[in-house]
Image: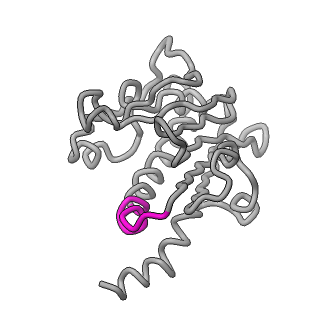
């Protein structure tokens, strides 16, 4: 067991904490970094979307159980009772998220109402920053960085304020698996020809 944990810490963890990101992207400051100055864990993941930011933004605005889901492995989320259904088309008339909005991860009556994050800030077609309710012990930022007129870097920043063994051994790898799928699905949806 100790050998497996050691191998994970030395080989897999550094890779998944920066999956898809360049050295420059890992080193730079992103929206949300200012909320936890010295995080215990900082993950910067990125993928190129072959579409302008305006095409990816609506999918980010649909994230949440009460909107379009999380575009990940719903069957895994539903194993723990999250009751997620992903919506693979744009929801007409859906307003952009606003600071203070709640993003539900599961039904309101599950997990003591704690399966939620709060929108800390929205920068139109640029970033949505989520934090847990109460003290800011974590940050989850969805960031769109235009790379050209027709391409966008979709960056996700995850910060944790405190080191926790359970986070490192279970939650970090689980979050990576789910977040990677989410990023690739949003990329695919944003790249689709409208009306296809």
Would you say 62 lies left or right of 84 here? Answer: right
Of residues 25 and 187, the one drawn nearer to the viewer in this rendering = 25
The furthest residue to the front: 135
Would you say 59 lies left or right of 6 here? Answer: right
**How far across and how far down the image is residue 185, in percent?**
47, 43
Which image quadrant is residue 192 in? Answer: top right
For the record, the magenta segment spans 163-173
Q: Residue at x 33, y 47 (%)?
A: 73
Q: Is residue 35 above or below residue 69?
A: below
Q: Is residue 196 above or below residue 42?
A: above
Of residues 178 and 34, the one drawn nearer to the viewer in this rendering = 34
The secondary structure that dominates the magenta segment is helix
Which image quadrant is residue 97 in? Answer: top right
Residue 40 within the segment the image draws in magenta: no
Q: Residue at x 43, y 61 (%)?
A: 172
The furthest residue to the right: 148
- Image quadrant where one finds the N terminus: bottom left
**How far across and how far down the image is residue 100, in percent?**
54, 24
**How far across and how far down the image is residue 18, in percent?**
59, 63
Q: Residue at x 63, y 30 (%)?
A: 121
| Applied colour scheme | one colour
């Amino acid at each position: 067991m100790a050998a497996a944990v050691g191998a994970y810490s030395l080989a897999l963890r550094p890779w998944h904490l920066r999956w898809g990101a360049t050295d420059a992207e890992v080193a730079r400051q992103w929206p949300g970094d200012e909320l936890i100055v010295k995080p215990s864990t900082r993950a910067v993941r990125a993928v190129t979307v072959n579409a302008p930011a305006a095409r990816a933004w609506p999918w980010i605005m649909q994230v949440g159980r009460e909107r379009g889901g999380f575009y990940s492995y719903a069957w895994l989320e539903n194993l723990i009772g999250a009751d997620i259904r992903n919506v693979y088309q744009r929801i007409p008339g859906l307003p952009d998220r606003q600071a203070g909005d709640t993003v539900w991860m599961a039904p309101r009556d599950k997990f003591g109402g704690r399966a939620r994050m709060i929108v800390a800030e929205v920068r139109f077609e640029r970033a949505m920053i989520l934090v847990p309710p109460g003290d800011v012990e974590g940050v989850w930022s969805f960031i769109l960085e235009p790379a050209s007129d027709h391409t966008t870097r979709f960056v996700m920043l995850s910060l944790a304020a405190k080191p926790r063994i359970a986070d490192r051994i279970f939650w970090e790898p689980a979050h990576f698996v789910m977040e990677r799928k989410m990023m690739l699905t949003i990329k695919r949806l944003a790249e689709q020809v409208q009306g296809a």
